[in-house]
Each structure stands twice: as structure tokens, then as C-alpha cells.
């Protein structure tokens, strides 16, 4: 009898032992993972989750260097012809082989109607299949950053997509659900076994992955937790292994708690202020018949009135990096050449007087209150700083849904003074210059996110040169020149790169990427 | 009776139509759905094309007519954010909300009624005073604060109960999921149910207390006492029964608001019910979900009101004779 019990105990131990070695990572994020079609939404968290299931031809390391992904190597055989050599022996989760056909198919699908990532492969690019594992991309003009965003151009299985009638990209105007939005079939290290949008998503390890796993996970459970307090509580109570983001005011608490640590670092997103320089009279101001922001002295006065160090220490609790240009120093080699205009309220007042506003003026400011870290608090601080030099700010802080509806092209750029954050999807300055600095018309043609309508022909010209310059040195010189002009003319007022804060249990080690993507490939749980 | 019910049914349809109309006009002010559906780099032309495809450029009356035509066939369209049919999404979230509401209503009744009777009978005892001051906290503290407080005490410090979610659920028949059958599911119910039910509990307790004080002064209680009936049967049979009419009204109406306005509790506890779905939809301007949810809420209220009206007639014989006399 005793022997039998002992045998049973051993058996049980064997079972439970096996259970214990199967590592499950539980994590929470503030937003939801909505649908699984990799081309439906160009948004960081969604792409980040897709990236654990799907893969691109290229990949990005934790420090954001471009490395081979599904392509083993690539070469520029002519300035307008790129050749990609595909990795052999790669399988999709359903067992299908990955070949050149899939790449060509994905290239067509990502730029078809309904896709939100059409910029990944420009319409003029021709895709030529050389053989099963070689693909040529023929470009209309040279483009040195062709592959910069291809780590999030996820390759889909042609056969699977066609068989499931999901060739058209899932669009909100569809009347029936698209197979690709409910199920995923990639080549990545994890497959999705359960997906209840807004409730939870379960990832399981894909045993047939082509690469040697660095992670030791068998299962990842994702739960969206919208409430900050609940998310932090779930980490502190040990129910979650990792949660993000952590509100800056809770970082200390997470660090003081036994068994949890807040992992912080600078993010790539640059937070800045913009001013309407296009209209002849501001929409929201007591100055009539002219637009004070058309005068560079006024823009500089606003800039110098803001004490960025105070914002950093008081509002951001030191979790921000004040910025002199409109792109993160991570993404631009010559960033150190630029310095912020010093905080100097006296100089600011002098500039205003010189520009003809010795008594200042009033202006309406638009600000989101649920989009960026402490966005509303920053705007309030800016309003207080500007009041000291005589500029009276009427702050209109709104939830992002209303805010973006008002200030973007669809709302007719209905703003005089606004706050915005920008991360270039390509991690490159061309994107910043084109979207935020190039001249635009009233409908948004040109620089669509240049809300203030800053315009300098020379910057537009430089942007075009940057697009087709293949030599990195020369290209950086051109970018520097462009930023020099926009900084001298105070096209925008860069504030800072906000910080990332992830809460992590001490039993878990992972890599925090500066673009706020969470890559399961590097997670080790003990 | 039949005439009464059919009159109420016609009114119900009118109410639902008005709710639909009002909510539709409000949707114009919640923001632009397009900005929430696409990434920031999407060009203005692409945004405009999407707006056109979704029919958002049509006059509001055309959009409303389209919605009503769909709603009549229980087709509420596809969610903008999830790209799934709204009816299906709400159907999947309904069990979570109903189970939570059911448990918190039971909690409110089974704790509130005895407390009300006790405080009504022993109005000067120390325990009564304690109950009353605790109940004051229940009515005056906002729900989200109570929820967070419970989380920090029972999840973070004591680590007895989970701080979020529904635990493990068991699927029944493919259309219902229940947390009643697993330990983690039951544990997950406790904190949200208390948070959601606390206000109703206090309300019921105070209501019963006031009614009891009233009833205990009436002649038939004095007569019953004079006849020498045991005080147990006086208190619970004669007195309590006669306090029930207003309690049923309030409980019925409150049940509607528990189901419909579990939004805050569901958000604090990340409870995967309809309220959470609705709140996410508001943040993302997911108009199809908002519209369907508001219609469902209106429907629940109208149904419960109807049921309460019928119950009155059943419970109170005086109403019955008056109505049949009409």
C-alpha cells in the first residue's frame, strides 16, 4: 500500500514537475488588441503584438538595429533594383512553406485598398520573383530607406489567405468579419490560440519556428487593463508578470514593492508644440487682422518662455529628455549639434515687445488629455509660463477622440496653438520633415501633419533630396541643413522625448525597446 | 390586463425609438471615428475615402434610417475597432455582466433586508447605529473609489482575491460562459459584486428600515401583539411582508441600473462585460457598439418597468380591483 502511494506521488511529481517547467507569461497593457489583420492598423501596440506572430523580411534588434528577418540578406544591384535573398526552411504556423510567392502576394495586399500601411510598399514599386527564394524590388527612383519599415511589413501566407477568402484587407466598412482579422497565421515564434478582443489573447510557442528561441516561454496571456490603478495593483499583487505603461507617479511605489521593478527609458516619441503660421488671422486670439505667429520673434518668445527643466522635474518626475529637434537623438546621428534655445523670460518679453506685442496677447491652445504622458499637465504648465511673459492662454484640453477630430485635416486644422507627439514610423528624419515641416494646402496635401502650416520652399527641396540620396554621410548633412533652417525659424517648439515605464516582476527578464514594442522573443522567466 | 400591457408595449416602442434618435444626434459630438481607426500617418485622402465607405458623409437622417433598418433585423453592423459584428460582441459580453449584476443584486438583498429589519426593530441599539454609519459610507463614496480601496486591501495587501478579470470561465452551450463553476471564477466575483451592490444594499436597508418603523406603528401590529403572537412571526410575517411593495419597485428599477451602469465597476475590475465594452467604444468612437448598447439598455429598462408594473397588479389586490373596475 505504502509503495503504491509512493509510486503515485512520484507520478504526480512528474506531472506537476512538467507543469512547472511550462512557463507562462501574464502581462497587461492599457489598450486593447483589437483585430489580427496585420495590415489594418498602423499603431505601435497592435504592430508589436502582430510582431510576435508574424515576421517581416527585416527585423529590428532590441536596440533597433536592422537585421535580417525572413530575408537572409539583401543587396542593391542597381540604384533602383534591390534583391532580397529569402531564408529557406521557414514554415508558417499551418505548415505551409514560406516562399517568394508569399512576399509578392503580401506586397500587393499591403498596398491594396483598405490597408492602413500602404506606405510600406509604394505603389510604383514592382515586385519581381527571380526564383522561389529570391525577390527583386524595382523602384521608380532610388530610395535608401526602402526597408526601414519592413520589420513591420508582416509577410502573410498566400495560400492560407486565399483559401480563407481574406485577400481584401479587413476594413471597417466590411459587412462580414474577415478571416484574417479573427485568426493569425504567421512564421513567428508564437501562434495565437485564443483571441477574445478586449478580453484576452493567448499566445502559444510555435515549435516549428526557424530560429533558435532565446525566450523560455510556452504560453503568453495578454489582458488589457484600462484603469491605471488596477493595472499597477495587478502587478503588485503578483497576478501579472509584467504591465505597461506605469503612470510616472507610481514608479516609486513599484520599485519599493518587493519583487517588482519599474523599467524606465527614453521613448522615441517627440512631444512638441505647434503654432498656426498659415492663416492671416488666428482663429482663437484677441489679435485681429494679423497673425502674431507669422513673426519668428513671437515664436521664439514662446519657446524661450517655457522652462523645460521644470516640466521635466515637476511634471515628468525626471522621466523625460528635453529635445532640441523634432526627432529623437536615437534616430539621428547629428542630433548633438543642436541645442535648445535657453529658457529666458526676459529675452522672451523683449522679443514680444520688439514684435509689437509689449502687452502680450491671448491665444487659444488645444491639448489632448488622454494621449501622451501627463499631456494636460504639460499644457497647463506651458500656459502658466506664457502668462509670465504676458501671453494669456485659453486652454482647451479634451479626450483624444475629440481632440484629433478638431485639429487634423478632417477638422480643417481648427487650432491656433496645439500639442502633438510624433514618432517617425520609419525611424528616419525624412518622415519627420515630410509630415511635419513640408508646405501644405488647406486640404492637407503636402505635409499632412504640419498643422501649423509652416512653409519654407528650401526645406521642401531638401526633403526631396534626402529621399533619393543614397550616401549616408551626404544624407545626414542634408538632414542637418533642413533641421538648421527649421530650428532657426522656430517652425515648432520641441519639448521632450517622453519616458517609457514598464512594471516587471523580478522573476522576469526582458528587453525594453525604445519604440515601446514588447517583443516576447527576449523574455526569460524563472 | 391585456389592454394595459399592449398600451405599455406601444409606449415601449416609442421610448426605444426616441432613445435611438437622441443617441444618434449625440454621436456627432463624441469625436471622429476615423482618427481612431487608422494610424497617424494615414493621409487625409485615405481618411476621406474611408469616411465615404462607412457612410459617415451621408446626412444624419440617412444614417439614422440605415441604423433603424438594420436594428429591426438585429443587425447592428460591424464594430469599427474589433471588425466583428456588434451583436456577436455584445452577446459574448452579456453573460459576464448578467452574472455580476445577479450576484450583486443577491448580495444587496440578502445583506440589505436583514440589516434593514434589524435597524428598524432595534433603532437605538449600538449595532444599528454602526450599520447606519457604515451605510452612509456606502451611499457617499463613489463606486470607483470603493473598488480601488477593496483592490488595495484584498488584492495587493492580503492577496486573497484577484484584482481584475473573471478568473477561469466554463462555456455552457456555446453561447453562455459562467464563472460560477470554478474556484477562481467565484473568487473573482466577490470584490466586483460588493462594489457594484454596496449602493443598492444601503438603499434597500434604509428603505426597509423606514418602512418597518412605519409599519410597526400601525394598528394591526398592535393587535397582533395584543393577541400574543410570537414577535418573530409579527416581525417577519406581518410586518416585513407589508414593507415589500416599495422594496420591489426600487429593487426592480435598481436591477436595471445595476445591469446598465455596471460600467464603472467593470472598468475598475477589468470585468469583461458590456459596460467595459461600451467604455472602450466611447474612447474609440466606435459608433456601432455605442448605438447597440444604448438600445439594449433602453430595452432592459423598458422591460423591467413593464414587469414591475405587472408585478404591482399581482401583488397588491387593491390595484387589481381598481383596474378591473375601469
Image (tube, coloured by chain):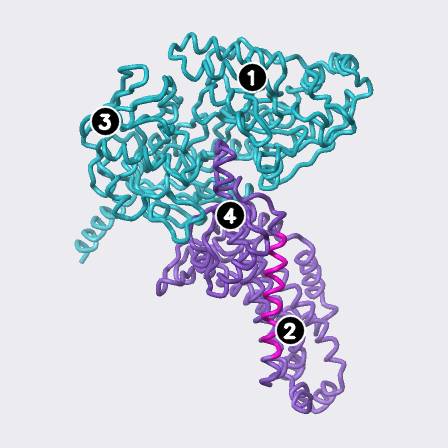
Chain colours: A cyan, B purple
According to the picture, the residue beneath numbered tag 2 turns out to be B249
Q: CA distance from mark 2 to mark 3?
A: 71 Å
Position of A444 with respect to A224 (left or right) is right
Q: CA distance from mark 2 to mark 1?
A: 64 Å
Q: CA distance from mark 3 to mark 4?
A: 50 Å
Horizontal and vertical percent position of residue A427:
44, 22
Which mark is in front, 2 or 1? 1
Q: Is residue B21 magenta?
A: yes
Location of the C terminus of chain A by quadrant is top left
According to the picture, the residue beneath numbered tag 3 turns out to be A86
Considering the whole magenta stretch, tell me its main secondary structure: helix
Q: Is residue B268 visible?
A: no
Horizontal and vertical percent position of residue A177:
38, 51
Horizontal and vertical percent position of residue A166:
32, 46
Query: What is the chain identity of the residue bearing mark 3?
Result: A
- Dot 2: few (<14), some (14–19), or many (≥20) neighbours within 10 Å? some
- SS category of the residue bearing label 1: loop
Which mark is in front, 2 or 4? 2
According to the picture, the residue beneath numbered tag 4 turns out to be B155
- SS category of the residue bearing label 4: helix
First-in-chain label (1 vs 3): 3
Query: What is the chain identity of the residue bearing mark 1?
Result: A
- Dot 1: few (<14), some (14–19), or many (≥20) neighbours within 10 Å? many
Image height of B220 relative to A145, above or below: below
According to the picture, the residue beneath numbered tag 1 turns out to be A325
Which residue lies at the image location 57% right of the left edge and 18% below the top edge?
A: A323
* Span colored in magenta: B7-26
Image height of B312 relative to A142, above or below: below
Amino acid at each position: 500500500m505504502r509503495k503504491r502511494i509512493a509510486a503515485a506521488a512520484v507520478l504526480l511529481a512528474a506531472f506537476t514537475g512538467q507543469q512547472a517547467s511550462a512557463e507562462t507569461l501574464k502581462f497587461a497593457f492599457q489598450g486593447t488588441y483589437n483585430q489580427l489583420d496585420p495590415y489594418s492598423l498602423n499603431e505601435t501596440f497592435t504592430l508589436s503584438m502582430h510582431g510576435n506572430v508574424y515576421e517581416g523580411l527585416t527585423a529590428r534588434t532590441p536596440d533597433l538595429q536592422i537585421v535580417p528577418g525572413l530575408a537572409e540578406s539583401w543587396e542593391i544591384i542597381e540604384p533602383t533594383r534591390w534583391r532580397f535573398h529569402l531564408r529557406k526552411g521557414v514554415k508558417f504556423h499551418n505548415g505551409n512553406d514560406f516562399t517568394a510567392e508569399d512576399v509578392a502576394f503580401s506586397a500587393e495586399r499591403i498596398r491594396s485598398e483598405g490597408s492602413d500601411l500602404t506606405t510600406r510598399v509604394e505603389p510604383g514599386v514592382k515586385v519581381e520573383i527571380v526564383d522561389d527564394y529570391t525577390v527583386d524590388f524595382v523602384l521608380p527612383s532610388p530610395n535608401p530607406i526602402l526597408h526601414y519599415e519592413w520589420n513591420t511589413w508582416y509577410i502573410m501566407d498566400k495560400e492560407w489567405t486565399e483559401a480563407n477568402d481574406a485577400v481584401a484587407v479587413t476594413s471597417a466598412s466590411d459587412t462580414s468579419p474577415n478571416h484574417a482579422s479573427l485568426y493569425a497565421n504567421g512564421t513567428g515564434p508564437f501562434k495565437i490560440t485564443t483571441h477574445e478582443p478586449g478580453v484576452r489573447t493567448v499566445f502559444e510557442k510555435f515549435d516549428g519556428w526557424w530560429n533558435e528561441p532565446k525566450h523560455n516561454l510556452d504560453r503568453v496571456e495578454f489582458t488589457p487593463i484600462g484603469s491605471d490603478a488596477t493595472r499597477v495593483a495587478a502587478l503588485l499583487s503578483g497576478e501579472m508578470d509584467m504591465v505597461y505603461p506605469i503612470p510616472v507617479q507610481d514608479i516609486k511605489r513599484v520599485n519599493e514593492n518587493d519583487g517588482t521593478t519599474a523599467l524606465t527609458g527614453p521613448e522615441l516619441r517627440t512631444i512638441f508644440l505647434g503654432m498656426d503660421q498659415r492663416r492671416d488671422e488666428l482663429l482663437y486670439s484677441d489679435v485681429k487682422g494679423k497673425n502674431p505667429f507669422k513673426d519668428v520673434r513671437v515664436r521664439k518668445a514662446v519657446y524661450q518662455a517655457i522652462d523645460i527643466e521644470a516640466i521635466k522635474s515637476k511634471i515628468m518626475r525626471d522621466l523625460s529628455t528635453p529635445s532640441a529637434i523634432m526627432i529623437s537623438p536615437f534616430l539621428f546621428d547629428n542630433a548633438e549639434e543642436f541645442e535648445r534655445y535657453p529658457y529666458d523670460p526676459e529675452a522672451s518679453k523683449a522679443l514680444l515687445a520688439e514684435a509689437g506685442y509689449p502687452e502680450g496677447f491671448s491665444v487659444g491652445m488645444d491639448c489632448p488629455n488622454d494621449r501622451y504622458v501627463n499631456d494636460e499637465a504639460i499644457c497647463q504648465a506651458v500656459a502658466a509660463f506664457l502668462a509670465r511673459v504676458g501671453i494669456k492662454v485659453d486652454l482647451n484640453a479634451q479626450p483624444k477622440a475629440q481632440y484629433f477630430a478638431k485639429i487634423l485635416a478632417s477638422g480643417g486644422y481648427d487650432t491656433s496653438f496645439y500639442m502633438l507627439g510624433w514618432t517617425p514610423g520609419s525611424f528616419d528624419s525624412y518622415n519627420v520633415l515630410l509630415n511635419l515641416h513640408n508646405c501644405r494646402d488647406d486640404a492637407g496635401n503636402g505635409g499632412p501633419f504640419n498643422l501649423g502650416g509652416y512653409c519654407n520652399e528650401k526645406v521642401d527641396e531638401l526633403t526631396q533630396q534626402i529621399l533619393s540620396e543614397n550616401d549616408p554621410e551626404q544624407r545626414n548633412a542634408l538632414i542637418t541643413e533642413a533641421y538648421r533652417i527649421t530650428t532657426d525659424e522656430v517652425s515648432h517648439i520641441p519639448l521632450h522625448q517622453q519616458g517609457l515605464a514598464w512594471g516587471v516582476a523580478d522573476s522576469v527578464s526582458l528587453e525594453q525597446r525604445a519604440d515601446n514594442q514588447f517583443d516576447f522573443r527576449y523574455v526569460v522567466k524563472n | 390586463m391585456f389592454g394595459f400591457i399592449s398600451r405599455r408595449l406601444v409606449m415601449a416602442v416609442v421610448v426605444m425609438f426616441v432613445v435611438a434618435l437622441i443617441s444618434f444626434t449625440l454621436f456627432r459630438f463624441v469625436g471622429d471615428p476615423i482618427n481612431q481607426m487608422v494610424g497617424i500617418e494615414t493621409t487625409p485622402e485615405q481618411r476621406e475615402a474611408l469616411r465615404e465607405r462607412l457612410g459617415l458623409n451621408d446626412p444624419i437622417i440617412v444614417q439614422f434610417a440605415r441604423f433603424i433598418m438594420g436594428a429591426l433585423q438585429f443587425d447592428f453592423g460591424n464594430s469599427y475597432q474589433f471588425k466583428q459584428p456588434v451583436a456577436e460582441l455584445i452577446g459574448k459580453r452579456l453573460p459576464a455582466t448578467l452574472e455580476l449584476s445577479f450576484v450583486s443584486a443577491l448580495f444587496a438583498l440578502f445583506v440589505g433586508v436583514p440589516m434593514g429589519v434589524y435597524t428598524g426593530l432595534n433603532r437605538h441599539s449600538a449595532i444599528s447605529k454602526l450599520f447606519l454609519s457604515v451605510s452612509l459610507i456606502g451611499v457617499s463614496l463613489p463606486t470607483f473609489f470603493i473598488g480601488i480601496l477593496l483592490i488595495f486591501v484584498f488584492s495587493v495587501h492580503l492577496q486573497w482575491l484577484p484584482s481584475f478579470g473573471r478568473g477561469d470561465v466554463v462555456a455552457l452551450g456555446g453561447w453562455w460562459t459562467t464563472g460560477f463553476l470554478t474556484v477562481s471564477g467565484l473568487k473573482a466575483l466577490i470584490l466586483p459584486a460588493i462594489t457594484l451592490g454596496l449602493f443598492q444594499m444601503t438603499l434597500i436597508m434604509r428603505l426597509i428600515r423606514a418602512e418597518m418603523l412605519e409599519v410597526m406603528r400601525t394598528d394591526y401590529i398592535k393587535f397582533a401583539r395584543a393577541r400574543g403572537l410570537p414577535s418573530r412571526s409579527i416581525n417577519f410575517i406581518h410586518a416585513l411582508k407589508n414593507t415589500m411593495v416599495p422594496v420591489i419597485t426600487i429593487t426592480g428599477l435598481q436591477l436595471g441600473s445595476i445591469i446598465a451602469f455596471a460600467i464603472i465597476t467593470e472598468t475598475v475590475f477589468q470585468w469583461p462585460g458590456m459596460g467595459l465594452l461600451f467604455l472602450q467604444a466611447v474612447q474609440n468612437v466606435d459608433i456601432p457598439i455605442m448605438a447597440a448598447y444604448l438600445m439594449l439598455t433602453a430595452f432592459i429598462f423598458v422591460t423591467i418597468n413593464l414587469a414591475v408594473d405587472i408585478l404591482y397588479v399581482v401583488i397588491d389586490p387593491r390595484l387589481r380591483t381598481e383596474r378591473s373596475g375601469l
